[in-house]
Image (tube, helix red, strand yellow):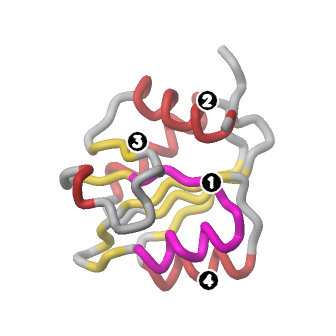
């Protein structure tokens, strides 16, 4: 298998622990060596301000709060990211229509495809 994420630093912003554990397992299988996680907008912003990431996965809704400020911070820092959501992909915010959206629950191959396209763009 292509070790797409070898030596890559990924930020995963997700508030549901079971989904987060599933994502971490999938990223490990893809060869990811470093996965940093946040469950709230505040945690994510602190991490983005203090670290460099190669890519990110961003839940659009964190405990009832939109994560648009996190998306804005990732864009400013040039960190490519994919949205994940349990809602409709038509709920994407203005200015973000070009970002990939994967719907939860997603399969391994859906995550692989989204990250492959993201990191090879």
**For marks 1 and 2 on the same chain, the one whose residue lies earlier in the sequence:** 2
Q: Residue drawn at (47%, 51%), measured in percent from left and top? A: 99
Circle 4 residues within 10 Å: few <14, some 14–19, many ≥20: few
**For marks 4 and 3 on the same chain, the one whose residue lies earlier in the sequence:** 3
Q: Nearer the viewer, mark 1 or mark 2?
A: 1
As helix, strand or loop, the secondary structure at mark 3 comes to helix
Q: Nearer the viewer, mark 3 or mark 1?
A: 1
Range covered by the magenta-colored residues: 68-83
- Residue wearing tag 1: 80
User: Mark 1 and mark 2: span between their CA atoms?
Assistant: 17 Å
Image coords of residue 18 (percent x, y): 32, 51
Disc marking residue 30: 2
Q: Residue drawn at (67%, 60%), measured in percent from left and top? A: 79
- Residue wearing tag 3: 22
Circle 1 residues within 10 Å: few <14, some 14–19, many ≥20: some
Q: Nearer the viewer, mark 4 or mark 3?
A: 4
- Residue wearing tag 4: 46
């Amino acid at each position: 298998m292509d070790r797409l994420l070898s030596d890559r630093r990924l930020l995963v912003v997700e508030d549901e622990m079971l989904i987060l554990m599933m994502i971490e397992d999938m990223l490990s299988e893809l060869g990811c060596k470093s996965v940093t996680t946040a469950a709230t907008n505040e945690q994510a912003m602190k991490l983005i301000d203090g670290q460099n990431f190669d890519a990110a996965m961003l839940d659009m809704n964190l405990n009832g709060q939109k994560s648009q400020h996190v998306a804005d911070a990732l864009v400013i820092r040039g960190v490519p990211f994919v949205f994940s959501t349990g809602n409709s992909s038509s709920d994407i915010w203005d200015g973000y229509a070009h970002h990939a959206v994967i719907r939860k629950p997603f399969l391994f191959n859906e995550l692989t495809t989204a990250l492959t396209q993201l990191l090879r763009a």
